[in-house]
Structures are given as C-alpha cells and as structure tokens.
Amino acid sequence: MATSLHAHVVEHLGSRIVGGFIPRGSIVLAADLEQKLQVSRSVIREAVRVLAQCGLVTSTKRVGIRVLGPEKWNPYDENVIRWRLASDQKGAQLRSLTELRISVEPMAAELAAEVAPEAMRKELMLISAQMNHYGRQGDLRRFLALDIRFHALVLAASGNEMFANLATPIAAILRGRTELGLMPERPHEEALAWHQSVADNISNMDAQGARRNMESIMRRTHNEICSLWEGAPRVFVDPIAKK
Amino acid sequence: MATSLHAHVVEHLGSRIVGGFIPRGSIVLAADLEQKLQVSRSVIREAVRVLAQCGLVTSTKRVGIRVLGPEKWNPYDENVIRWRLASDQKGAQLRSLTELRISVEPMAAELAAEVAPEAMRKELMLISAQMNHYGRQGDLRRFLALDIRFHALVLAASGNEMFANLATPIAAILRGRTELGLMPERPHEEALAWHQSVADNISNMDAQGARRNMESIMRRTHNEICSLWEGAPRVFVDPIAKK
DNA sequence: TTATTTTTATGCCTGCACAGATTGGTGTCA
DNA sequence: TGACACCAATCTGTGCAGGCATAAAAATAA
C-alpha cells in the first residue's frame, strides 16, 4: 500500500467531513469505524487524534466521536485546505486564500527588500528574467512554475516563517488559475513588468517600490479570479462562541 | 488527572523540542519514551501522530522518531505558537505575528465595512465606546479585554475564516504588550480616536476609511512593540528545500 | 561496486481493565 | 401526585500489555 493505513483513514474521514457527507453534530463510534473500514482500533484512534488536531472532531467518553462544524476547523491546516478545495466550498476557500495573499505579499515584498539574503535576491532576478522570456513566448506551463517559484521566494525572503508557509496554498491558487483557463493566452506585459520591478526593487533594497509593485500584481490577480467565488457565502465566526 | 495522558506527552515533547532541548536531527525511540515517561505504547504513538501533524517529528520504520528543525514546524499551529512564545524564540514569534496582523487587519477592516452583519457592526460601536470610556479612565485591565474583543470582532466581521482564526494569537500579542509594560499609562487619544473611527467606518460601510484608520493603529502598534525583537535573527526558509 | 542477509524499530492487531459521562430507576420530601 | 436528589447500570473512549508483520538500515557476501 502506498501510504500508511492510518493516513488513509484520516484522508477518508477528513474528506467526507469537509465535503459535508458527515454533517456537523454527527456521532460516529470507533467500533463502527473499525468494522466499516476494516482496520484495528489503534489505527482508528491515531486517525481520530489527527482529525481532532485539525478541529474536525472531538471524542468524548460515553458519547463517541462528534463531528464539528466548519467554524471549528483549522483553516491553516494543509489537509483542511486541500479538502475544502476539493469540495463545494472551493470558491470560499479560494477567496479566503486570495484575500490573505493580497494582504501579505506586499508586506513580504517590502520586508524582502530590507532583509533578504543575497542569494535570494539573485535568484529572484533570475526567475523574473525567465518569466519575461517564457511569458512572451506564451509557454504557460513553464511560466506557471516560475510564477509559483517567484512568489514563494518573495515570501521566503521576507524572513517571516508565517509568510513563507503560505507558499504551498498560494501555489495551489496559481495552479488553479491556469487550470481553469483564467490566465490570458500569454501574460500581460504589465504583469511581467511588475514582477520584474519587484525583483529589481528587492535587489536595490527599495522597500516601498517593492510593496507598490507587488500591490499592483495583487490587484490584477484579484480581478482575474474573483469571478471564481461569485455568490459563495461568507462565514462569520463569532470569536467568542469559537472557544 | 486533569487532561488526557497523551496530551501530557504532547505537551512534554512539544515544549522540549520547540524549546531546543531536543535538537533537530535527534532520534528518540518509542520504547525509550515508554520507559522514561512511564506510559504505554498507544499513548506514545498517538502523541507522536499529533506532533507529526505539527511538523515537529517524523517517525519512520527501523530508524525511530526523528526531531525536525524549525523550518518544518507549522507556524500556524496553536501549540507551536504557544511553545515558541514560551521559549527564547519569543521575540521572533512576536515579530512574525505582528507583521502578519499589520498585513491582515487593514484588509479585514476594509472587508468588514463591506460585508459585516448588522449585529457585529453594532457590537463594534459598543466596544469602541467602552474603549473610550475605560481608556480615558486609565483602566488598562478592562481596556485590554475590550481591545482584544475589538480586533477579534473586526477579523470575524471580515467574513474570512482565515482572518478570524488569527484572533487567538493576536490576543496573545495584546496581552503580552500590557504585561510587559509597553502600553502607555493610559491609551493615547489618537489611538482611541482611530479605534472609534474604524468602528464608525465599518458601520457606515466606508471601506477605504476603515482600512486607513486601521493602518494608523497598526503603525503605532508596531512602533510600540518592535523593541521586543531587537536582534532576534530572521529565519529564511528555502521554499524548495522545505518540501 | 552490487546483491543478499540480518537486524531492529515502527506499524498494526487483539484482549483486557478502567474511567467517566449518560441514562434510568429509586427513594425522599413537598 | 409530582418534583428533585441520589444511585446504579451501561456504554464508549482511554490506557495497558504483548504479539506478529514489515520495511529500511546495516552488515555481509559476491
């Protein structure tokens, strides 16, 4: 088998809960899961621990394993994000992530201009040059890979590990955008220029310039993909009820 | 016993790893842990699963439980944040969190002005009025509680669950600021006015105003506490090596 | 160097005892 | 009779102990 048994159980239950097939408030029994999934108690128990860590379930004595509602899910958990993107909450997840990156990336660019190590500035210049090249050529496949690397690098170069950690879900957004055909046939000249400018600004330690140009990229990105979440409902989590 | 046994093991190991007492690359054996902590294998295994979920360890056959380095830790995990704040990385953790909230809160205010439900707008007005009252009175204890509630509300009212989820660590920042005596004896009139304005703007659906005033709050906040992380080293995580 | 065997720690399974929360019944008192 | 406090039965997760299977490192042989 490709991956460990308990990981399979996590995947099975997690995707079903996030997908809405096991509604909030449901109570499942460990013994039933053993039988249904044909695995032993230890596997179930470890899987439930992991799911509890993600905020998908709690397990209490005498009652069983209770499925929690979306407001309890950890929205930064990689699994949760993946499961949401594969569900009918895809729009809402993309919106949340995009709003987050719009907030964070300009600050990341600003910080990168101040503190990035030399090697990262160099690589950023290299990447942006290649983006220009393959972008003008209309090679969207290669452009996508470079774009992902570019934004991941800026986030990493900020020296803020919370920013850097957003690289993976942001890569998912970028892939989604091309897969869904929301990219123009070839990247706009403006976009290419902004990426180049961000790299230049970071190289020259022009923090405000880096921020401004990254903001331009974010504005365009937002306009290109905000159609994806037309009508997706917003979730308002009362921070008190949360605890 | 107050909490479950395996949670104790998670706490024990997690705090030691994040605190640097079990250095990266260390390999601990489940059998040794059983003996040292006097618990059974199932407890150890479940705890290890949770720690693996946080990115603190991986467990592989024939080798044992390998302790991972900080670049693999999930910086959004509540436990990880708490353990870092209790370690000598406190400065770096506060800086990361503060940079994140500086990035996010203005956007949250802007969104809140557009989409917040009526009840939240109302409560925001109430809270800001009380902040004025207790702030002028110099009652820092009550002011702190209101400040926490205020920022949590704005984040929640944005309708972005990723924003809303930052309320807990941001509350930790705010508490830290007063505990460490970085607050002025009584809040500045400017700060009070900005909070009031943010509440007003959100009530009036003035998105740009809400953003601007929140940005002012963030600028001052940053200046007040950036002394906390003087000299704390930045961590640059290469997004490729990460995976 | 390459292939094979040995070693060894985790992965997985099962039986058992315990803890604690829910439920329902029992008895007391108004 | 009815409301309420108390207690016992029951159910389910929690924790323990020990066993076999398996994968990967290390040692050995080709």
Image (cartoon, coloured by chain):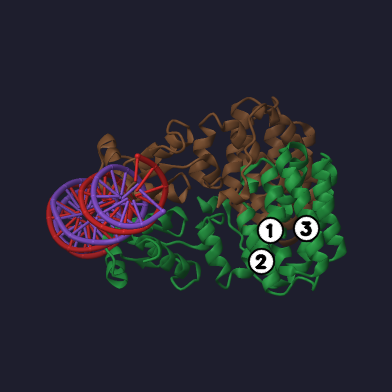
Chain colours: A brown, B green, C purple, D red
B230 up-or-down from A156: above or below: below
C10 in relation to B114, above or below: below
Say what secondary structure mark 1 lies in.
helix
Q: Which residue is mark 2?
A: B175
Q: Earlier in the sequence, mark 3 or mark 2?
A: 3
Split into 4 quadrants, where in the image is the N terminus of chain A? Answer: top left
Q: Mark 2 is on which residue type?
A: Arg
Work out whether residue A1 or residue A238 is closer to the camera in this orientation and state it: A238
Q: Position of residue B68 (x, y in %)?
A: 45, 61
Q: Amino acid at mark 1?
A: Ile
Specify the quadrant of the image occupied by residue B181: bottom right
Q: Earlier in the sequence, mark 3 or mark 1?
A: 3
Between the residue at mark 3 and the residue at mark 1, the CA separation in whole angstroms equals: 13 Å
Q: Which residue is mark 1?
A: B148
Q: Alpha-carbon neighbours of circle 3 within 10 Å: few (<14), some, or many (≥20)?
A: some
Mark 1 crowd level (few <14, some 14–19, many ≥20, 10 Å Cα): some
Q: Quadrant of residue A102?
A: top right
Q: Residue drawn 66% across and 51% down?
A: A155
1 and 2 marks in contact (CB < 8 Å): yes
Q: Is residue B34 left or right of residue A187?
A: left
Residue ID for mark 3: B130
Q: Position of residue B55 (x, y in %)?
A: 47, 56
Mark 3 → mark 2, Cα distance in angstroms: 18 Å
Query: Which picture quadrant has residue B11?
Result: bottom left
Q: Position of residue B32 (x, y in %)?
A: 29, 69
Instruction: Give the crowd class for mark 2: few <14, some 14-19, many >=20 residues within 10 Å.
Output: some
Q: Nearer the viewer, residue B139 or C7?
A: B139
